[in-house]
Image (cartoon, rainbow, N blue to C red):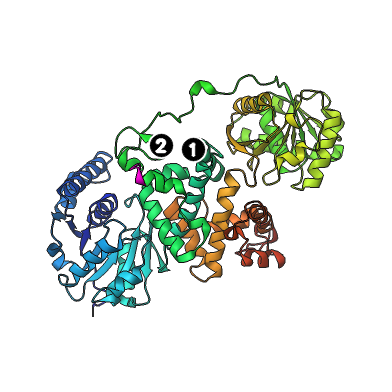
Amino acid sequence: MMDTHTPLNTVAVVGLGTMGTGITEVLTRAGREVIGIDVSEGAVRHAVAALEASTARAVARERLTEQERLDVLARFRTFSDLQAAADADLVIEVVPESYELKQQVFDALDGIVRPDAILATGTNALSVTRLAAGSARPERVLGLHFFNPAPAMKLVEVVSSVLTAPYAVEAVTRLAQDLGKEPVAVGDRPGFVADGLLFGYLNQAAAMYEAKYASREDIDAAMKLGCGLPMGPLALLDLIGVDTARTVLEAMYAASHDRLHAPAPVLGQLSEAGLTGRKSGRGFYTYEAPGSGVVVRDALTPLESAEASGGRTVHSVGVAGSGTMASGIAEVFAKAGYEVVLAARSQEKADTAKARIATSLARSVDKGRLTEEAKNETLARIAPAGSLDAFTEVDLAVEAVAEDLEIKQQLFASLDKICKPGAVLATTTSSLPVIACARATSRPQDVIGMHFFNPAPAMKLVEVVRTILTADDVHATVREVCAKVRKHPVDCGDRAGFIVNALLFPYLNNAIKMVQENYASLDDIDAAMKLGGGYPMGPFELLDVVGLDVSLAIEKVLHREFRDPGLAPAPLLEHLVAAGMLGRKTGRGFREYARR
């Protein structure tokens, strides 16, 4: 038996595609001897060239000396035959996602490697247990899942099957730490933690695009700007490979029978047509050349000149509400030069809301983002009012009151009576039907959704929600206004969750299910999504910030609208809400927080 303190100094990497090449770079730069094996001479040449190019860039950036670069390159030897793995302490297999291919590699390695060598599969979708069971040494087989691009991504999932010996896990975990990675120990199920959550979300984004609910550009912009993600889901599918995503989802669906994991038909259509993403030069987007990340125009690219025009004139804006969202939205409009009426249920509440804006603007002055003069001019444009009656002359009325349909409908009925003919009436709802607000008026053609994100002054995204009755010039007006207040508008239809919440909350719900099923811990899931998915916050950090009651309400709305069993709120979420554990605002949610 191998001593767990024996370092894994010589590593064979079988399969020199994108992942194999990235793993090779990580290992050689950390001082490991790497035996690169691939049957394709082209793949071998590409891997060597990639390592030469990346180390040359590191020298140019003064992260490596020329001598260190030569040492790194000398540690990488390439072969076309698996026999070269005979002296390896560890073999990492990263051939394409096919049981047959992987099983062939493992069968061959059984007769080649030393008895104490550890065998790792880089799969992110296939059963490690099944691969181990077919090996002559199942206790030495585990999963070692790096993320793309391997040199940059910190997360490594170390996957144990029921057959894996603890010493193998310890040795590989120590190696991952030595490589400067953050290993997370997980059990064997398709997708593991990060991809198990990520691919369900990517699949729903593909289905949303396929349904023509929103354009690919708007879906991607919404998730980047609304959630702070480094890439939009459709661009990420192209990077991962549409065919790879389909394979992962097939494996996940076979294990879960959750409809959310059943691959969207468009993934199959693109795969069958050979439009597999960046590697083929075309997927959801079209690229400059195969392997390039540079997107080029195609038939679906919106024209730059197609920016909204033909809208109504807007000089003054009314904002109804006195909470954080209302004051943030009023600040956005006033900063952009609009005259703003900020109406609350009493003059005192309106004055308090304006005082909140003054504090926010003062912080911007302190940080050098705003001059004292600009602050004073902005505040001068805001007129606080104790009643909606002050909205008689506004060109655009924006409702930002409580997320309660009855309250909103009453408010729209009032706006209908007070606002002048031709005024645009907008709701900032994040989950309620815009048409229900519109029908409370005698002019539903003038009603539209403008879903700002919190905090409104900082967040660039606005979801522009047309109902089936919204007039074209009203839609054009809101697009023009968004441009003037320097927000990024995305168009979507009037259905639950719009773009962001419809994609975000099922992902959060699935994370809760993972904890509920004791598959992984809160900390491991949060770490996996931040390190493996580039998320600014882990799902449980985010749930506690949003509020578990708010999250539950949105989950229920999505489940009620789409009737998909996979969207039913996780029982654990319902239990926490019933217990009054609502997140940061109550001091306890998924985690405990110090009382302020």
Q: Identify the secondary structure beneath mark 2.
A: loop
Residue 467 magenta-highlighted? no
| Count of numbered circles in the view | 2
Residue 217 visible, this orientation: yes
Find disc 1 in the rendering and name its residue: 216
Query: Circle 1: is it few (<14), some (14-19), or many (20+) Cα within 10 Å?
Result: many
Instruction: For the N terminus, give its image quadrant.
Output: bottom left
Q: Identify the secondary structure beneath mark 1.
A: helix
- Residue 371, relative to residue 496: is it above or below? above
In the displayed structure, does residue 558 sit left or right of residue 192?
Answer: right
In the displayed structure, does residue 20 sit left or right of residue 70?
Answer: right
Most frequent secondary structure within the magenta stretch = loop
Residue 191 visible, this orientation: no
Q: Which of marks 1 and 2 is nearer the N terminus?
A: 1
- Specify the segment rendered in magenta: 272-276
Residue 102 place in picture, x, y as percent: 26, 63
Residue 248 place in picture, x, y as percent: 40, 57
| Pointers 1 and 2 in contact (C-beta within 8 Å) | yes
- Residue at figure coordinates x 85%, y 29% from the top left: 418
In the displayed structure, does residue 54 sit left or right of residue 555?
Answer: left
Instruction: For the C terminus, give its image quadrant.
Output: bottom right
The amino acid on which the numbered mark 1 sits, given as a three-letter code, is Arg
- Residue 33, relative to residue 58: is it above or below? below
Find disc 2 in the rendering and name its residue: 285
